[in-house]
Amino acid sequence: MSFGKHITLSNGAKLPQIGLGTWLSAPKEVENAVEIAVRNGYRHLDLAMIYENQDEVGAALKKVIPSVVKREELFITSKVWNSSHQPDQVEKELDETLKQLG
């Protein structure tokens, strides 16, 4: 769901400008919201470890990939916390995000 608005990345991929944010969602809300959003056309999801709900996002993704959408069609953005920007910490943060997403 981007209403035709996107940003073209250097590799030619088109990132939807409108995405579903998961910040400040109550527990057990995010899984349902992500599933409904993807089923209704959202292809960009915005997450962060600090939101403490990436496991719910992962649970929702398991419900819609590949039956509703291919993984390659989704843009899943997360964030590296400010205290983890050192090169030796970034990969650790990424691995933890991927683990939480399942």
Image (cartoon, helix red, strand yellow):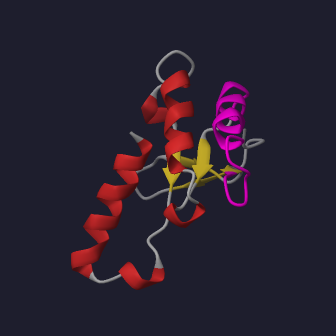
Q: Position of residue 101 (x, y in %)?
A: 43, 44
Frontmost residue, 100 versus 10: 100
Between 10 and 27, the one nearer to me in the picture: 27
Looking at the rendering, in which quadrant would you find the C terminus? top left
Across and down, in percent, residue 27 comes to 68, 47
Residue ranking furthest to the left: 88
Residue shown at 78% from the left, 41% from the top: 3
In the displayed structure, 52 sits above or below 45; it is below
Q: Quadrant of the N terminus?
A: top right
Dividing the picture into quadrants, the one containing residue 90 is bottom left
Q: Position of residue 81 (x, y in %)?
A: 46, 75
Q: Residue shown at 41%/48% (left/top)?
A: 100
In this view, which residue lies farthest toward the top? Answer: 67
Stretch of the chain drawn in magenta = 21-41
Drawn side of residue 43 relative to residue 61, left or right? right
Residue drawn 52% across the image and 50% down it: 54
Q: Is residue 71 left or right of residue 69?
A: left
Q: Is residue 66 above or below residue 71?
A: above
